[in-house]
Image (cartoon, rainbow, N blue to C red):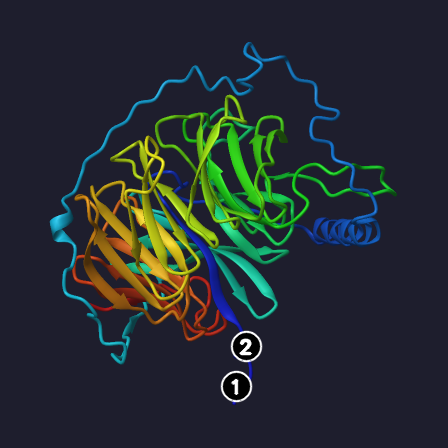
Amino acid sequence: MEEEGTPTVSLVSCMHFVKRGVAKAVPEKIELTEKELEKIIKQTATELRLTEDGDDQSDEEAENAEQVRDPPADPNDEFNFENYDQEEGSDPVGIGTIATLPNLGDLSENVQIRTEGPDSDEEDDIIKPDDNLLLVGHVETDASVLEVYIFNKEEGSFYVHHDIILPWFPLCIEWLSHDPSDPQPGNLCALGGMDPVIQVWDLDIENCLEPAFKLGKKPNKKKKTKRIGHKEAVLDLSWNRNFTHVLASGSADNTVLLWDLDKGSPHTKLNYFEDKVQSLCFHPLEAQTLLSGSCDGRARVTDCRATDAHRAWSLGPEIERVVWDTHNPFCFAMSNNEGKVAYVDCRQDEPLWTIDAHQKEVTGLIISDNVPGLLITVGSDEKFKTWDITSSSPLQISERSVRVGQVLCASQCPDAPFSLAVGGDNKECFIEIVDLTTNEEVMNRFGSRTQAPVGNNDAMES
């Protein structure tokens, strides 16, 4: 029998690590007066009422309507992908330090939690240069929250710094630095979910009730507004790190949109998919190249300068995740809903290899940017595995069961490449951080948010 106050559902639907040094040391805090809060509540209620009254009454699309644009120099290259500069630097780490013993980690071990003293709250508010942020979409019963965690591997700290209440179930998170209102790089995240409108939040502001801006608009006859953007849920997002004003979104409406963040509108639509598009990834070096995975069982590589120019590779029934190999820029990996993973060289018609990686769908697929040849797979079979893909046939290095239940998402820390975060649907333990060199859990987040209040510094003791 559930204890009073215990949530019936507590799961992590999406997560994303953010590199060090991009967040403000002390985020700005917004303090609203009663009148300002009352105004926002009334405005939100009005918008919800208009949405309920007018949704689906008018489905005319304003793909380019009411948007005045200067014609591109090349009609087939709307974003001028042909001209861009790209500098690439890396400090590769050897794959030999990955743990090689399978099934390590006793899941029955008691977890010891360290809580700092009474003066720790003020210290926890400061984001240090060696802190990473971990952005987490957390759903607890009927509440959806974006939680901004602090992760510091050297100090062994892991806690919620601040959170943002969301209006709908989050499905994907993408970090970006492009702020259309500020020439300086920002610290923002784009969120996609069950609603077709994308929200972009400023992570350097606490207590904010509204996103920095939105991408898309629902149709409404009463307000005489046409639809802008997607018709259905947004399943994945990918920010173009070479053309920073471009964001790609994949949707359950079987389309991909390329958004111009400066104009706040979609500039290009890819509509040749036969089912939902649930994974996207811009190429790390080629700004014009977009990798996508669809539930029609195909992964596609598109040249965004000419949207009809694309190639497809099959791994049915449904593609779950796609990811580029930054150490082999012609190659990418894709996974499906039957536990298979395939590795593709874009210069060839068939995958180089295909393996049965998991017993159920592969929901997390990572090729390490820092460790050449390291592939990480996580699945709904409650396991994650590491692989060496430096040779023509992949070699499994390790395997570990996790406590988070069905693994719904995973993210590798960019500054501590042997730290892997996984999120799942176990309400008793919904986030684990694992050290890949030992294959052991080093930190976790468990229980409900009422049991682990925002601001506590919860970390595993060594």
Residue 68 appears in the picture as rendered:
yes
Q: From the image, tell me which residue sits under label 1.
A: 2
Q: Residue 461: which disc?
A: none
Q: Is residue 258 above or below residue 293?
A: above
Q: From the image, tell me which residue sits under label 2.
A: 8
Of 159 and 326, which appears nearest the observer? 326
Q: Residue at x 64, y 44 (%)?
A: 197
Q: Position of residue 446 (x, y in %)?
A: 40, 71
Q: Residue at x 54, y 76 (%)?
A: 7
Task: Please identify the quadrant where the C terminus is shown.
Answer: bottom left
Q: Earlier in the sequence, mark 2 or mark 1?
A: 1
Type of the residue with mark 2: Thr
Residue 154 appears in the picture as rendered:
no
Secondary element under disc 1, as helix, strand or loop, is loop
Of 18 and 436, which appears nearest the observer? 436
Q: Is residue 99 left or right of residue 32?
A: left
Q: Mark 2–mark 1 contact, CB under 8 Å?
A: yes
Q: Is residue 135 left or right of residue 100?
A: right
Q: Residue at x 65, y 42 (%)?
A: 230
